[in-house]
Image (cartoon, rainbow, N blue to C red):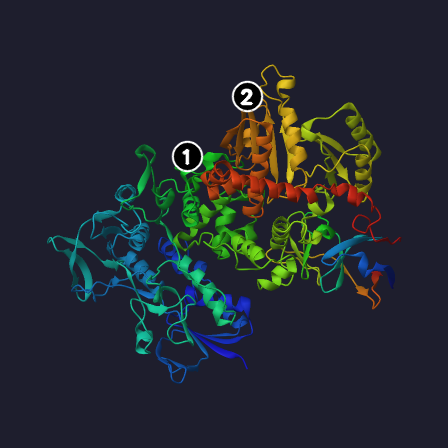
Amino acid sequence: MKKKLVCIGNGMAGMRTVEEILKLEPDMYEISVFGEEPHENYNRILLSPVLAGEKTIDDIILNSAEWYTENNITLYKNEKVVEIDRIRNQVKGENGTVLDYDRLLVATGSTAFIIPVPGHQLEGVIGFRDIKDVNTMLSAAKTGKNAVVIGGGLLGLEAANGLRKQGMSVTVVHLLDTLMERQLDKTAASLLKRSLEDTGLNFKMEAQTEEILGTDGKVSAVKFKDGSTVDADLVVMAVGIRPNINLAQQAGLQCERGILVDDTLQTYDPKIYAIGECVQHRGQVYGLVAPLFEQAKVCANHLVDLGYSRYEGSVTSTKLKVTGIDLFSAGNFTGTDNSEDIIFQDPSIGVYKKLVIEDDKIIGAVLYGATLDGSWYFQLMRDETDISAMRDKLLFGQAHLGDSGHGDEDHILTMPDDAEVCGCNGVCKGDIVDAIVKKNLFTLDDVRAHTKASNSCGSCTALVEQLLASTLGNDYSASPAHKPLCKCTDLTHDEVKDAIIEKKLTSIHDVFEALDWKTPDGCATCRPALNYYLISTFPNVAEDDSQSRFINERAHGNIQKDGTYSVVPRMWGGVTNPAELRAIADVADKYDVKLVKVTGGQRLDLFGLTKEQLPHIWADLNKAGFVSGHAYGKALRTVKTCVGSEWCRFGTQDSTGMGIKLEKMTWGSWTPHKFKIAVSGCPRNCAEATIKDFGVVAVDSGWELHVGGNGGIKVRVTDLLCKVTTEEEVQEYCGAFMQLYREQAHYLERTAPWIERVGLKYVQEIIVDDAEERKALYERFLASQEISQIDPWAELAKKPESPQFKPLKRIEA
Amino acid sequence: MSQQFTIGTLNDIPQMGATTVETPNGRYAIFRTRNDDVFALRDQCPHKQGPLSQGIVAGNIVICPLHNWRIDLTSGKVQAPDSGCVNTLPIEAQADGTLILTLAD
């Protein structure tokens, strides 16, 4: 027999939990749902656009009647629950429905707080909470002229904006002198007030409502403490929400401001869980959607008896859903005694940015007029990243560090619908917004799956996140603080890596077993990551599972769009000679190579080879003295050099020789992502060393070492690590830096984002300041190289008949 | 009439891996899962003709190496949110591991 789950509340929190349960254990429960409203579940956060006439009710329905039927969920809509009987484990509805439960989910949400001033019960005084309120406002706008919105917070301003768009003359009344004081500082609030005034809204600040006046039981005006009055055909109270806890209180469940729950969303009654705006968790009550989605995941995890997930509270950020106004706020934006503000303000273009910094970390942010970097700052804030090294550039945003693919297009609101956001997959702004609304997408992953935007190179991720935020407003849940490695686990990269070390796991299936993987074989995201973590943590011991490597690393070539491969032989330091060139020319002729191309890393790339040809061409290249160039791997790629002091009249050191030494030392090493090195012979930097993962620039007195550069999607110039004098030192620092990166970065994280995440200071403390640690890292690097420097081509060239390369059989017609 | 062909043995294919067979109807990818189930699918992703035999196999899914489309080995169906399907052929591993592929004419 199925267990019975009853959910009180048919809102976003309750249904999100039910959806999460269905994903995990679709057959575990017989599910019934009570909803007080006469509707299916809808997207409450999109009520503002409905009021503004930008969307219809149908647009915002999340789960249709069919969805309930298909999933065998009984919906009692239009029925309020009047009693929870915890002795009999029963729930009673006002229409006489009585249901037994094995588990009860309380998701009663919250109601708008109505200030109990005289006249608050008059017709035409409402909150802004549900479809009914919106319908009341829409019909008031048809007959009446004047509206007063009490409350200059997020919700109040959205209501006011909607009513104005419906043609009403709207006055916003606020108790304080700053709008949205919980999200904005004074400067941003006054900018906001000015632009809202420009749209035609009226404001009455520092005004306390004394009474609501009426005629014939209908509202007619609002009177204030200072004696003044404002005419009103409609009064919307948006001064806050109160969790709906009456029902829970009557049932004897412990409540304070909300229903008390623990980290599993369980109430004091172990059979009863509660979620959403009605709960109080670690002293916090949330009124935004993002935390609620995080809660739903955890709650479902416990309701289906998995029991390992925990909710530890949410950090929230805010976005105002008023068309044409770009506003972002997060964290502590007013600062503390020890914090400092970094501020950029340009009134003529209407931009204001403020970051609050404490102990070299961002603790709060307010952005007005240019919010593209909101999600980046938010991420830095939640990751507690040390920002000291990029402090001078921080305020100009992530794009300032360089960007490709969409030029300087960073103002999402002014972008036309047909503007291309994702240059890789040709996805326009309109496509993305459409998909978000019509397919009810809430996260970056959702958008990636449904539109392919931001799914390839990722350079438009900030733009897509921006679109999500501006379409969904508060409800956009930015990537969660604890980002799981992939959908097969709830653990993060770091948690998985730590577990591998701690539990001494040496094979992928050991990891799956020890860490309760959700899928039997993992997926194309986690398997390559795990394989890397295993072989880099326990070189020599862990098995390198070739089936968990991407095809390029299995075939030791780069797969091309037509399924053929390209092959790059290694040319140490980019130096070659007539014999080598002749050998390559012969091979190119023999295998009918379609294209020979000089790469950006100073190598020759041979294109158009079939898989069957690979072992044969490798054998021929081996014979001529070549080994694999690893142009296909998450590995040391190339060491690019300039000619240096041997030939160049400006050269200060032998950069070519140095580059060859580095390449001989580092080739064959697997790294979290590709790793490029360059050595320039003088500060003219012809080898472009300052956009490489490890760049060496010769100066007269020695060598400058640079790290964390990138010339790809996001151009990032290296940070100067330090200066050294001898070639031996260059090698030691290079090996130590690579080893630190190999041990600590996440799989598929280039050195640039890794350094931005951990901070340059951290890397310097280990590599530059701590000679002992540097030597230990260098030794670990060399030890791992002893078993890594085997040419994969030579191994595989011995088996040209293997079914890995050749069809198992040819069946003739 | 359909015709049966012995194409090799189970051990010719790595677990969670694939090999290929050329047929008069084009190249087919022969997959072996971790449970030693075998499947034969046209070696061509319906998206941009990527060689599915080169993809990563997880459970009964292969992930196309070109753009990560996910294809169900049992049905040949492309997994949501993408859509499409890949032709499949009946294939069977006998008790001794011999693989028998059936071609319709």
Q: Residues within 10 Å of mark 1 (few under 14, many from 20)?
A: few
Q: Nearer the viewer, residue B6 or A763?
A: A763
Residue at x 58%, y 48% (from the top left corner): A747
Residue marked by disc 1 = A393
User: Element under label 1?
Assistant: helix
Residue A341, visible in the rendered structure: yes
Dot 1 and dot 2 residues touching (CB under 8 Å): no
Q: Residues within 10 Å of mark 2 (few under 14, many from 20)?
A: few
Check the image and name the residue furthest to the left.
A227
Q: Residue A258 placed where, x, y %?
A: 32, 67
Q: Residue B32 placed where, x, y %?
A: 75, 60
Q: Are marks 1 and 2 on the same chain?
A: yes
Q: In this image, A565 relative to A219: left or right?
A: right
Q: Nearer the viewer, residue A474 or A759?
A: A759
- The answer for which chain carries disc 1 is A
Quadrant position of residue A120: bottom left
Check the image and name the residue furthest to the front.
A772
Q: Which mark is residue A684?
A: 2
Q: Nearer the viewer, residue A552 or B60?
A: A552
Q: In this image, A167 relative to A397: left or right?
A: left
Residue A16, visible in the rendered structure: no
- The amino acid sitting under disc 1 is Lys
Q: Residue A346 placed where, x, y %?
A: 32, 33
Q: Residue A360 placed where, x, y %?
A: 38, 42
Separation (CA) of disc 1 from disc 2: 24 Å
Q: Nearer the viewer, residue B78 or A533?
A: A533
- The amino acid sitting under disc 2 is Arg
